[in-house]
Image (spheres, grey):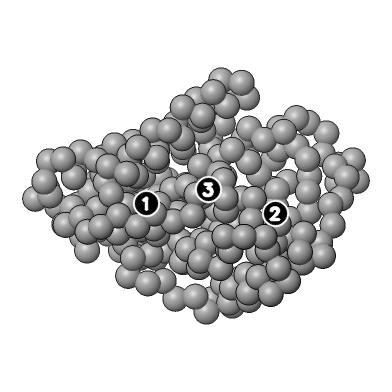
């Protein structure tokens, strides 16, 4: 399966900010929102592996899948506050390069790539960004990113208690697939040039459809959701395609 590169994470972040400004939303000083620390609290900002993953996959492909899974779990370690600010910032910078290399080696679909890259950005914003307390646009990925983390936490809890059934894992995968679909559709709506009001209206409609549960995940997004759950438990055969 051919590799499909989505928009770069840096471009997506800048374009979202531009679209937000185009929508007429303003910035509120951090002092008015009670943000005092240097660290930004999580609430302060607003093709899957080729072939089956049941052990019959080529060694190289399975090895690439496991490497990306290792990096996914390391992002989870950051999310759980394992590292202090300076150490974590340095580790995340190095981790980003490893993530991009692993995504290229798999290769990854745009759905899986975007899901992983959004998690990298979530770690940066929630753990290592100096607080600026901007009022985020209503369609900011903050909510979907947080929902991914909530699913990961539940998966880890069930695994630790020996209660992670295939049915429970699939339920979590479907929930994450909904977030992956939102990420991909939002990326598809972002322009390559300066944002316009029409662009803002388009992404706002996507957000409204997401909120109304009217963005059914494609097969690729569902596969990305399954990959995320399998990454979390390091089991490439947990949820066969």
Side (left or right) of 240 relative to 110: left
Side of 197 where 164 appears, left or right:
left
Q: Which residue is mark 3?
A: 9
Residue sitting nearer the eye, 19 or 49 = 19
* Residue 43, position as x, y percentages in the image: 69, 48
The residue under label 1 is 228
SS of the residue at dot 2?
Answer: helix
Looking at the picture, how far across and down is residue 52, in whole percent?
16, 57
Looking at the image, is 113 positioned above or below residue 195? above
Q: Are marks 3 and 1 in contact (CB under 8 Å)?
A: no
Residue at position x 34%, y 44% in the image: 103
Check the image and name the residue furthest to the top.
87
Q: Is residue 86 above or below residue 162?
A: above
Q: Which is closer to the viewer, label 3 or label 1?
A: 3
Write down the residue under mark 2: 17
Q: Position of residue 44 (x, y in %)?
A: 73, 46
Question: Which comes sooner in the sequence, label 3 or label 2?
Answer: 3
Upstream in sequence: badge 3 or badge 1: 3
Percent x, y of residue 81: 56, 31
Instruction: Indicate which disc, 1 or 2, sits on the residue closer to the N terminus.
Output: 2
On screen, residue 175 above or below 77: below
**Alpha-carbon span between mark 1 and mark 2:** 27 Å
What is the quadrant of residue 190 in the picture? Answer: bottom right
């Amino acid at each position: 399966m051919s590799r499909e590169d989505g928009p770069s994470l840096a471009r997506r972040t800048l374009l979202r900010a531009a679209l937000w400004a185009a929508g007429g939303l303003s910035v509120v000083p951090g002092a008015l929102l009670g943000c005092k620390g240097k660290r930004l609290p999580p609430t302060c900002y607003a093709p899957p592996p080729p072939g089956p993953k049941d052990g019959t996959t080529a060694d190289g492909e399975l090895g690439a899948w496991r490497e990306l899974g290792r990096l996914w779990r390391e992002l989870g370690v950051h999310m759980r506050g394992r590292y202090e600010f300076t150490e974590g910032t340095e580790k995340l910078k190095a981790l980003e390069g490893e993530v991009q290399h692993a995504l290229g080696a798999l290769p990854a679909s745009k759905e899986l790539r975007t899901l992983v890259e959004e998690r990298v950005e979530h770690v940066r914003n929630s753990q290592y960004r100096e607080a600026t307390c901007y009022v985020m646009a209503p369609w900011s990925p903050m909510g979907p990113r947080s929902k991914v983390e909530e699913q990961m936490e539940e998966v880890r809890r069930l695994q630790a208690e020996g209660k992670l059934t295939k049915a429970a894992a699939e339920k979590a995968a479907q929930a994450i697939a909904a977030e992956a679909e939102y990420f991909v559709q939002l990326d598809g709506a972002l322009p390559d040039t300066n944002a316009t009001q029409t662009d803002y209206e388009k992404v706002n409609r996507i957000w409204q459809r997401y909120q109304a549960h009217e963005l059914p995940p494609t097969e690729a997004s569902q596969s990305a959701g399954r990959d995320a759950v399998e990454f979390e438990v390091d089991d490439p055969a947990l949820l066969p395609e």
